[in-house]
DNA sequence: GTCTATACGATGATAGAC
DNA sequence: GTCTATCATCGTATAGAC
């Protein structure tokens, strides 16, 4: 919301780049194509982001702004419920999910400019979720499930609905907790 | 094993490409670099694979050969045990896991040459696993967890060990089954 | 702030010799 | 089967004008 002021060239550029990375991946997203999308030349765009990597950083920041997992979270049951809602929200914005999935996948590559970002981010989210969920291993598992479900869903939106699968996980985690 | 005969140029090339895609991603894996790795010029390589995409197809085939999930699977408990072993095997071959993770992530991209391959593959594995596991939703979830755990592990091999997290899932699934 | 011109290094491919 | 030329592009980035 802070990035979207009218007349805000940088915001326009970041949003365009964000979308295009989801469509084509980072290596195949050219500065010229992004520039064209916002009615600029490639050189005009470089006025705002001196290098392509600078633009990527801005895109990742935007990703975090759009993230829902920001607020302070309640107990175990509360988190799972909140995450279920996140799954629904994500199901309504395939573009954003796709950008995240593509970048996360690419990031494991040697020397990828977003590698440190994702490594740090996963560690942080894992710790955050572990607080509400009790243990870190379950947190790791839940995050993994969310990521993996997105891949299958993006490849087959009808055949691999995310919500039922996540509910199944939530049910299992809840039951496992009750059994202790 | 069938692809590895001595003097088998094609096999050499595919293995090199396979490794390099895991290291750099598909778009950043150049034909010249692959060629050099096997002591050929870029044009010499093109003698075996007329286009870069032809090479990718061969790489995906090799991926399937290396896959452990080939054999006929037993009951629910048996599958989870077999998958746990797969997790251990994967933990010993980060290169292969990385290639798969990178390609799977990229594949959700519009018009990616491997998109159809992955869509088909997930549907197939889901169905196969559903047979042993009982329902398709659980199969979807288990596959998702495996994929997601790989991402976190590749980014942080020490901090995100796959095995404990998978065991936790297996335990939950087993318990859920027992509770029926 | 945005453009024109342009440097400069890839990259995927073709044609044809050996 | 493998190489030497050779292309046609493309892609990031710089310099400098308007």
Image: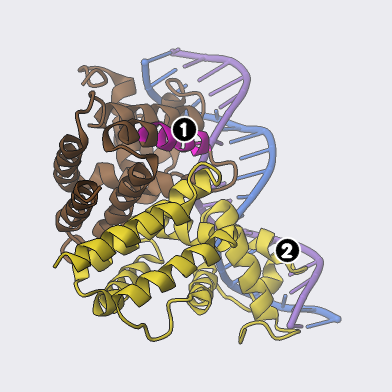
Chain colours: A brown, B yellow, C blue, D purple
Q: Quadrant of residue A2?
A: top left
Per the image, the residue denoted by label 2 is: B37
Using residue A87 as the reference point, say whether residue B117 is left or right of it.
right
Q: Chain letter of disc 2?
A: B
Expressed as whole percent of the image width and height from the top left, the position of residue B12 reads 68, 75
Q: Which mark is residue A120?
A: 1
In this view, B64 is above or below B174:
below
Using residue B26 as the reference point, say whether residue A70 is left or right of it.
left
Which quarter of the rendering shows the N terminus of chain B? bottom right
Out of C12 and B80, give the one closest to the viewer. Answer: B80
Q: Secondary structure at mark 1?
A: helix
Of tags 2 and 1, which is closer to the observer? Answer: 1
- The magenta span reads A113-125
Q: Chain letter of disc 1?
A: A
Expressed as whole percent of the image width and height from the top left, the position of residue B145 reads 34, 56
Which quarter of the rendering shows the C terminus of chain B? bottom left
Q: Label 2 crowding class (10 Å Cα cut-off): few <14, some 14-19, many 20+?
A: some
Q: Secondary structure at mark 2?
A: helix
Q: Quadrant of residue B168?
A: bottom left
Q: Residue at horizontal 30%, vertical 23%?
A: A11
Expressed as whole percent of the image width and height from the top left, the position of residue B126 reads 28, 72
In this view, A36 is above or below B18:
above
Q: Label 1 crowding class (10 Å Cα cut-off): few <14, some 14-19, many 20+?
A: few
Out of A53 and B89, give the one closest to the viewer. Answer: B89
Magenta-colored segment: predominant secondary structure: helix
């Amino acid at each position: 919301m802070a990035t979207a002021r009218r007349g805000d060239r940088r915001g326009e550029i970041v949003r365009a780049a964000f979308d295009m990375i989801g469509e084509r991946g980072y290596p195949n997203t050219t500065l010229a194509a992004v520039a064209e999308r916002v009615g600029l030349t490639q050189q005009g765009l470089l006025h705002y982001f001196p290098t392509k990597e600078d633009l990527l950083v801005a895109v990742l920041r935007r990703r975090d702004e759009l993230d829902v997992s920001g607020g302070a979270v309640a107990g175990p049951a509360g988190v799972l419920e909140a995450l279920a809602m996140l799954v629904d929200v994500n199901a309504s914005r395939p573009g954003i999910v796709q950008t995240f999935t593509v970048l996360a996948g690419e990031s494991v590559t040697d020397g990828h400019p977003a590698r440190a970002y994702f490594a740090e981010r996963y560690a942080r989210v894992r710790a955050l979720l572990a607080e509400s969920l009790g243990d870190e291993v379950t947190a790791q598992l839940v995050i993994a499930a969310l990521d993996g479900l997105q891949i299958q869903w993006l490849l087959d939106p009808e055949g691999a609905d995310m919500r039922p699968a996540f509910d199944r996980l939530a049910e299992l985690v809840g039951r496992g907790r009750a059994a202790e």
